[in-house]
């Protein structure tokens, strides 16, 4: 898979869950959160009930949440930029690889393309 596919399948739900929790702390209701993030109210509920967005790799989950917190601390509220920043950081640290269903050696063309893309 290409990096964007890996991110969309594995990391995007985790990012959305974190954003749901942040917006909930800002006293927004599920309908407001749903509109703001472009997801359904039932998806918001599932994130709040922890029925979605669980990465099997705790280290990567912590890394994603750390980068997301840093983006917010720097005043970066642009979701697209945050998403790309998280992807770049995970690729640079070669942590995105472990979320791919296919394993590549570090000197393979696929690995080099992933690290250097975007």
Image: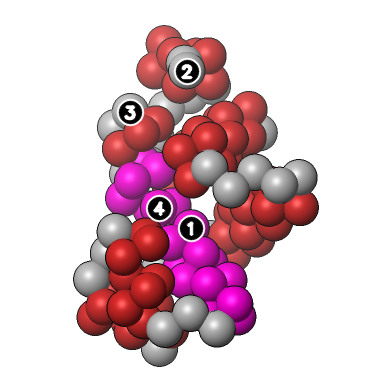
Report the residue at 40% width, 43% height from top.
7
In whole angstroms, how far apart are the C-alphas of marks 4 and 1?
5 Å
Callout 1 environment at 10 Å: few (<14), some (14 to 19), or many (20+)?
many
In whole angstroms, how far apart are the C-alphas of marks 2 and 3?
11 Å
To which residue does mark 4 refer? 12
In whole angstroms, how far apart are the C-alphas of marks 2 and 4?
17 Å
In this rendering, the label closer to the viewer, 2 or 3? 2
To which residue does mark 3 refer? 2
Is residue 89 covered in magenta? Answer: no
On the image, the x and y values in percent for residue 85 come to 58, 35
**Compared to 55, does 106 lie above or below?**
above
Mark 1 or mark 2, which has the lower sequence index? 1
To which residue does mark 2 refer? 118
Report the residue at 57% width, 30% height from top.
88
- Magenta stretch, main secondary structure class: helix
| Quadrant (top left/top right/bottom left/bottom right) for the N terminus | top left
Question: Is residue 37 in view?
Answer: yes
**Compared to 24, does 34 lie above or below?**
above
To which residue does mark 1 refer? 15
Report the residue at 33% width, 46% height from top.
8
In whole angstroms, how far apart are the C-alphas of marks 3 and 4?
14 Å
Callout 2 environment at 10 Å: few (<14), some (14 to 19), or many (20+)?
few
């Amino acid at each position: 898979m290409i990096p964007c596919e890996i991110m969309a399948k594995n990391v995007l739900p985790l990012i959305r869950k974190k954003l749901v929790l942040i917006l909930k702390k800002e006293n927004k209701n599920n309908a407001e959160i749903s509109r703001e993030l472009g997801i359904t109210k039932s998806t918001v509920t599932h994130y709040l009930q922890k029925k979605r967005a669980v990465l099997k790799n705790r280290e990567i989950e912590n890394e994603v949440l750390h980068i997301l917190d840093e983006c917010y601390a720097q005043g970066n509220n642009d979701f697209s930029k945050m998403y790309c920043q998280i992807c770049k950081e995970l690729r640079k640290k070669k942590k995105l690889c472990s979320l791919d269903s296919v394993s590549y050696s570090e000197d393979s063309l696929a690995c080099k393309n992933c690290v250097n893309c975007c």
